[in-house]
């Protein structure tokens, strides 16, 4: 498969989180067409993960209990809005070009090249990474049932397995990946006519001081991996300019550089008792494996890796820059795409 052509084909199939079925069907069809044993792993509704292994690897199929020693993985979903593909002499543009449809193309191209050398890797493409990692959670449950339990029932020494996860790291290998702690802050009040504020109880007036205090709170810093950071990503509340608001809500996201227990305690204490604080999602900070001779970086973003623990020891790298992911000018360098294919092949050979 030509990686540039495949990247553009994948970009042109809209797959905003929750709507991955079409791109999943395309990948399932293409991988089946070139001879992979390919399965659709149900996730939710019509959504599914795609898991494929080469039939050349003896009797192995995706349903078998012995997985490949190395699995390439990334996600099929994108953030909104949909942006169709285009290209010039050096770059491919469009939503998902670097996060992560170009990576899918590079991983498939690498798997095909390795297959010609009788080195067999698996391919796992999941749904929902940009929202809640639901596809990764389902894949992990699948691995627990098909891989881990089977190994536990035998007396043979467990073979080492590796998961090479793809995210835009400019073909550097990540030494660590920051974690994610999502925080929801909610305030309740009582509606009244805005001409008589004394008759109401403003939820917004409760929320704003809590957010101001949280913004001023000192956050942890790791001398090697940098600071924990905060983003207030969403604020909503109120009914109308002439109504005292009875509801206000904010969604916050902290990027973790260590355990979250002490940070959670400080968030609760700092926000105060005028608001309700909940923690709907956490993905932990991770230290990751390096590979000799490959440049390194620290990933300030979070990946599906914490939800794929049953797939083997994780590595994180891929073409493209995270600095242009999620932007209206998202792109991937064609040269990096080609280099990623070589890099994935090299790493798979070393690990396998």
Image: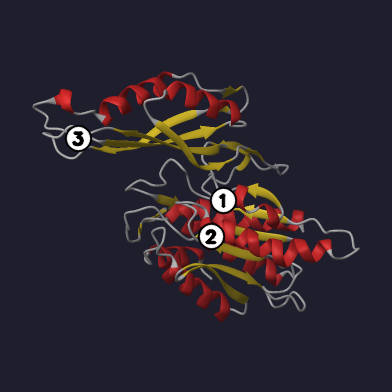
User: Vertically, is 181 above or below 196?
Assistant: below
Residue drawn at the location 11% of the way across and 32% of the way down: 193
Residue 59: quadrant of the picture: bottom right
Marks 1 & 2, CB-CB < 8 Å contact? yes
Camera-near label (3 vs 2) is 3
Camera-near label (1 vs 2) is 2
Camera-near label (1 vs 3) is 3
**Is disc 3 surrounded by few (<14), some (14 to 19) or many (20+) residues within 10 Å?**
some
Location of mark 2 (residue): 135
**Is disc 2 surrounded by few (<14), some (14 to 19) or many (20+) residues within 10 Å?**
many
Instruction: Check disc 1 and report its element: helix, strand or loop.
Output: loop
Q: Quadrant of the N terminus?
A: bottom right
Give the numbered dot on residue 191.
3
User: Vertically, is 201 above or below 148?
Assistant: above
Location of mark 1 (residue): 304
Q: Quadrant of the C terminus?
A: bottom right
Residue drawn at the location 79% of the way across and 66% of the way down: 150
263 or 6: nearer the viewer: 263
Q: Is residue 213 visible?
A: yes
Left or right side of 301 for 329: left
Image location of residue 111, percent across then percent down? 64, 66
């Amino acid at each position: 498969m030509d990686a540039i052509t495949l990247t553009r084909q994948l970009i042109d199939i809209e797959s905003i989180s929750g709507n991955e079925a079409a791109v999943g069907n395309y990948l399932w069809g293409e991988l089946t067409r070139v001879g992979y044993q390919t399965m659709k792993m149900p996730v939710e509704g019509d959504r599914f993960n795609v898991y494929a292994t080469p039939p050349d690897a003896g009797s192995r199929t995706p349903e078998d209990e012995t997985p490949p020693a190395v699995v390439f993985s990334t996600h099929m979903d994108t953030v909104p809005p949909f942006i169709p593909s285009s290209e010039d002499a050096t770059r491919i543009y469009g939503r998902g070009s670097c996060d992560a449809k170009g990576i899918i193309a590079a991983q498939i191209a690498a798997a095909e090249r390795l297959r010609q050398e009788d080195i067999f890797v698996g391919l796992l493409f999941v749904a929902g990474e940009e929202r809640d990692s639901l596809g990764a959670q389902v894949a992990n449950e699948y691995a627990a049932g098909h891989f881990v339990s089977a190994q536990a029932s035998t007396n043979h020494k467990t073979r080492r397995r590796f998961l090479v996860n793809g995210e835009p790291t400019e073909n550097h290998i990540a030494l660590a990946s920051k974690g994610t702690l999502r925080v929801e802050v909610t305030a309740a009040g009582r509606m009244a006519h805005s001409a008589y504020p004394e008759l109401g109880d403003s939820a917004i007036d409760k929320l704003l001081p809590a957010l101001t205090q949280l913004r001023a709170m000192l956050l942890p810093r790791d001398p090697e991996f940098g600071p924990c950071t905060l983003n207030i990503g969403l604020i909503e509340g109120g009914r109308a300019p002439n109504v005292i608001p009875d509801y206000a809500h904010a969604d916050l996201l902290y990027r973790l550089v260590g355990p979250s227990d002490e940070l959670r305690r400080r968030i609760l204490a700092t926000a105060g008792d005028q608001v309700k604080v909940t923690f709907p999602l956490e993905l932990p900070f991770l230290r990751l494996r390096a590979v000799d001779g490959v440049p390194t970086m620290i990933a300030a973003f979070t990946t599906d890796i914490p939800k794929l623990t049953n797939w083997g020891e994780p590595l994180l790298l891929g073409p493209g820059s995270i600095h242009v992911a999620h932007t209206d000018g998202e792109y991937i360098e064609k040269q990096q795409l080609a280099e990623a294919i070589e890099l994935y092949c090299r790493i798979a050979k070393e690990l396998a």
